[in-house]
Every structure is written in C-alpha cells, then in structure tokens.
Amino acid sequence: MTTQETNAGAAPPAQPTAGSPDDKQKSLLNRYGIFLAAAVFLMLYLMPTPEGLEPEGQKALAVFCTALTLWVAGTIPIYLTSMLAIVGLALTGTVSEKTAFGTLGFNVIWLMVSAFVLTSAMVKSNLASRFALWMVTRFGGTPTRTLAILVLINFVIVFFIPSTTARASLMVPICIILLEIYKAVPGRSNFGKLMMLQGVQADALATSGVMTGTAANMIAVQFIFDQAGGDIGYMDWLIAGMPMALLSMFLTFLVGLRLFRFGDEVGFDAGMSRLEEQRRNLGAISLDEKKAMSIFLFTVTLWATEDYHEALFNGFEISIYVTAVIAAILCLMPRIGLLEWKEANIKWDLMIFAAGAYAAGNALESTGGAQWVIGGLVYGLGLENMSTTLVYVVVIFLSTFSHMIFTSKTVRTTILIPAFIALAKTLNMDPVTLALAASFTLTYTITLPPHSKVNTLYFATGYFSVLEQLKYGIITCLIGSAVISASVFTWFRLLGYGL
C-alpha cells in the first residue's frame, strides 16, 4: 500500500496561501540570517567580558548563539551550521579540538543510527502496515471507536518505529483510505478534520512517553546524565512518561469530539470492507516480517529488563545503546537480517546536526556560560523569589510552548535542557526532576504545520486549516502542561523523584 495509491482519486490537498506575512518574514530571516548570525557572533565575541563570566564562557556563548541564529533562520542547512559550530569551538579555543570533535562518537549518536536502521527494517518488512490494518478492521466498529483505535495504534507503534515522521508516513495513507471510502470531503468533513488532527496529537504525545520515540528524547537523557548526574533508563522514562501521555491523550480526545462534532456524516460498512480487502492482499506473514518481529521482541525485552541485567547476568549490564546497536546488526546481518546497508535510511545530516548541537551545548555548560545566562534570567524574572511549585509550572509551560519559536525538537532540547539543569542548580532544586519534567514536553510541536514534518504530512491532506490546528494544538499543549505539572508533585513523588 503506497501513498500514491491511497491518494488516487482524492481531492487536491489545500495549500498554504503564498505571500502571507508569515511567509515574507520567514523569507527575510532566511535571506539575511547569515548577516544576522555574523553580527551576533561579533557582538558577543568582542564585547567586554561581563562580570561573573569567564572568557571561555563568553566564547562558548558567542558560538552557541551564532549557531542558534543560523538554525532558526535556516539560511544554510542545519548540519552545516553544526559543522561550523564544531570548527568554531576549536578555532576560538573554547574547548579542545578533541572535545569539540568527540561528540560524533557519543553513544546517543549510535542509538540514533540504530533507530534509523530499525525503522527501515520495519517499513521494508510491512509488519507495521499489517498491524495497523488488523487493529482497525478488528476493533473499529463505530466512528468514535475507529478514532480511538487510530490513536491506540500510534501509541503501540511508537515502541518499534522510533521515528515520528516514519509513523506519520504509515498512518496518513491509512487515514486517507478510511476518509475516501467514507466520502469525507477535505476541508468540510469534521470527521476528517478530527481524524487528521488527532493523528498529529497522538504522534506527539505517544512520542513523549517512550525514550526512543524521537532523537530529542535520547539527547535530553544524555544531557541529564552528563550535566545533572541522572541515569534515566528506558523503563524509567516509560514508567514516568507514558501514564502522563495516555491521560493527556484521553483528555484531548474528549475535547476533540466536542470541538469537531461529526454526527452521522460517514458510513462505515463499505469502509471496513475495503480495509479488510487491503489486509487480505498482504497475504500470509512473510519471512521478513517474522525476522522483524523476532528482532523487535528481542530488543524490547532487553530494553524492558535493563534494570535487572546486573542481577540476571552477574554484574553485566547491556545498556539501551548497546541493545540498539545489536538490533541494528541483526537487521543488517546476511541471512539473519532483512536489510542491506544501502536500504538503511540513516539521516546522516541529523547525526552531524546532533553532534554539533551537543558540542555547542556542552561547551556552554562546561565553561559556565549557561549558568551565567540562567543566573541573569533567574534574577531578571524574579524566579528566585518564586515557590518551587511555581518554578516547575513556569518551566513546564515555557518548555511546552517554546516550540512556537524553535521548530526543531532537537534544537529546543539543546537549548532548554542544559538551561533548566543550570536553573535547578542555581535555585538548589533537583536538576534531574526539573529537566526530566521539561523533557516530556519536547515533542509538543503540534500547533502549526511548519513545526514538524509530521504536521506537514497531515496538513498536506487538506482536511484541516491552519487555524483549526492552532486551536486544537494550543488546547492540547495546555492540557499536557497541566498534566505534567500535576504529575511532578504526585506521580513523580511516588516514583522517588525529589524536588
């Protein structure tokens, strides 16, 4: 089942209006971003060193803010900006050359590489498509139940497709098939609007509950370990995050049913027959699907039992990173696996981008630049006079809605998590708890189409407008932020996290 096949006969998707003020602002920023970045670098690098800031911290701040300006402006590719940042750190003497270039060898980079290999294997084997079609045809008997099943599928496949874009690429064609069969008109059908918008929300919320759901989660865990000393394992993240993700999705689901009432506008009998036919056309389970399922179960088993490895294996532990690389090796192994190297859709540009983001972020932390900036923010906003409860709430809401400025989850992670760790240290709060709570908001890139590739894929179907996504996205962000804020003082406490 291909995207081209599912789009056959569908109404042309709605396109954003050209020449809008937002487009003009973005074009200006893109055009002059390199000059703005150069001005930022020269201003920060050449200014007198502020009191309380070391010269190395000033250099790190200059390189970091320059890279941030280029990442936001998009004047040059994000991976090229990261390469410039790494070279800049070395040439300015901010950190040693070995430290600057060493980030590409971080274990989280290997985890990301392995995640892309696993994604490629699942897509090639057709295992994920088979599961999704089976779920819908087996359990979707009414419009509301079908919507719920689609949400549930997103929450299940996040465990074995560690890519938000890959999951959206799987789900969008299935949604289009459903809506075409039910004769839901793009832009007019409330059922179509809700199905597509809940696809966006479910992808984001499910991702927040699983450490390997996106690279941003894994990068956040690395920052928490390196800068706060918190060792967050796969099950630690899952136990803390998944209940919040499920509760937020449930509340968002109920709100969506109220916002987009669809009544009896669709008929389901013919639709289910068509999907049954699609499922039957897949035939018997193939050898590649069996291999993919075996590797998946092996991987999840090791991830799920990580905290018990030392007891089970006499002091020997297999980390999530080693497990992921083993899974990638199995996927690529001749005869045993199901992929050749050229079929592994590894995003090397993302690898280089992440390495540069790490280098800049860690340099800012190690030189004291982050602490200096956060110290100024603390006293500037009066956070030092706020109660611990209010600080948590402000940080969580700030982190959630920061995606309206920084569209990349990885960029937000690189900026915010080290900053929040420094903030917690300044206020004598638990940096692990504050950073972890903020990390669960990093996937909330849901309010506007350009904020993520997932948004773009769903928006391109033409079933909902920018305003409808903005409205539903803001409601979801408010609900999610409130749930996470409440959980810090209830669920987190039960799990043993301090304040």
Image (tube, rainbow, N blue to C red):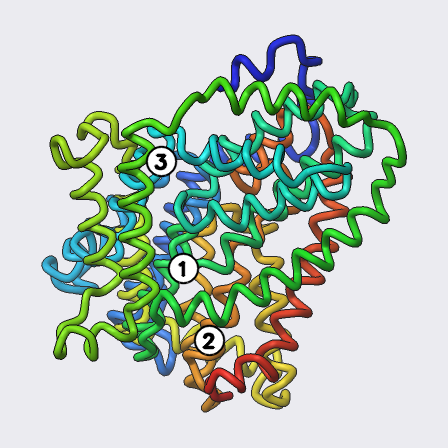
Residue under label 2, please give it: 374
Label 1 is placed on what type of residue?
Answer: Met
**In contact (CB < 8 Å): disc 2 and disc 1:** no
Which secondary structure, mark 1? helix
Query: What residue sits 89% from the left and 31% below the top?
Result: 264
Separation (CA) of disc 3 from disc 1? 18 Å
| Residue 33: quarter of image | top left
Residue under label 1, please give it: 211
Separation (CA) of disc 2 from disc 3? 42 Å
Query: What residue sits 65% from the left and 41% below the top?
Result: 139
Residue under label 3, please give it: 122
From the top left corner, tell me how far across and down residue 454 is, in percent: 54, 37
| Residue 117: quarter of image | top left
**In contact (CB < 8 Å): disc 3 and disc 1:** no
Up the image or down, 329 lies above or below 392; here it is: above
The residue nearer to you, when weighing 133 against 167, is 133
Label 3 is placed on what type of residue?
Answer: Met
From the top left corner, tell me how far across and down residue 308 is, in percent: 27, 75
